[in-house]
Image (cartoon, grey):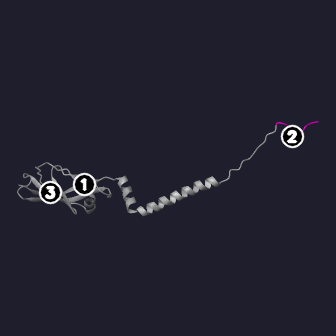
Amino acid sequence: MIGEEAVTSIVATLPEDLSEAMVIEDANGWTASLDGNILSLSSGSLTSGESVHIAYRLSRYIPSGVRIYDIEATTETGSTFTTEGSVAIPEMFPMRTLGLISNYGFWVLVLAAIVLLAITLQVAIGRKEKVTKVEVTVSTEPKDKEQ
């Protein structure tokens, strides 16, 4: 009966953006493979109430948010059942910045060159400006002498 039998394989259909960026690092004793958007877990066993945690990293930026995916599990007697899973992707500003630089590298380089040129011109113009000196003489003698 499903619910009393151990689950021996799991197949998850992940959202495309997640599966393209996901790199599996550890499957908590299971054998994991990612083919396209299909994540397969085998060579493990889950009894009722247990869960498996997959450690992964993202190889590129994807927008933050919760991703819902379908799961098909197979029990030790060959029975199957389906359910849903979810994963929350946090916002990663450094990864997003690097992604933008990667996607628009040429334009970032052009912008950096323009800024560098503007700074260089400001420094050059500042050095060429003449500094005028004004000499002031203060006399302690009265201008008109009384006779």
Judging by the rendered image, the residue that carries numbered circle 2 is: 143
Magenta stretch encompasses residue 141: yes
> Is the Cβ of the residue at disc 2 closer than 8 Å to that at disc 1?
no
Residue 94 lies left or right of residue 78; in this view the side is right
Indicate the quadrant containing the N terminus: top left, top right, bottom left or bottom right: bottom left
Q: Amino acid at mark 2?
A: Lys
Magenta stretch encompasses residue 26: no
Secondary element type, mark 3: strand
Judging by the rendered image, the residue that carries numbered circle 3 is: 10
Q: In this picture, which residue range is highlighted in magenta?
A: 140-147
Q: Position of residue 9 (x, y in %)?
A: 12, 56
Label 2 and label 3: CA atoms lie apart by 106 Å
Q: Amino acid at mark 3?
A: Ile
Judging by the rendered image, the residue that carries numbered circle 1 is: 87
Indicate the quadrant containing the C terminus: top left, top right, bottom left or bottom right: top right
Residue 97 lies left or right of residue 9; in this view the side is right
Which comes before the other along the chain, label 2 or label 1? 1
Q: Which mark is nearer the camera, 2 or 1?
A: 2
Label 2 and label 1: CA atoms lie apart by 91 Å
Q: Residue at x 44, y 63 (%)?
A: 107
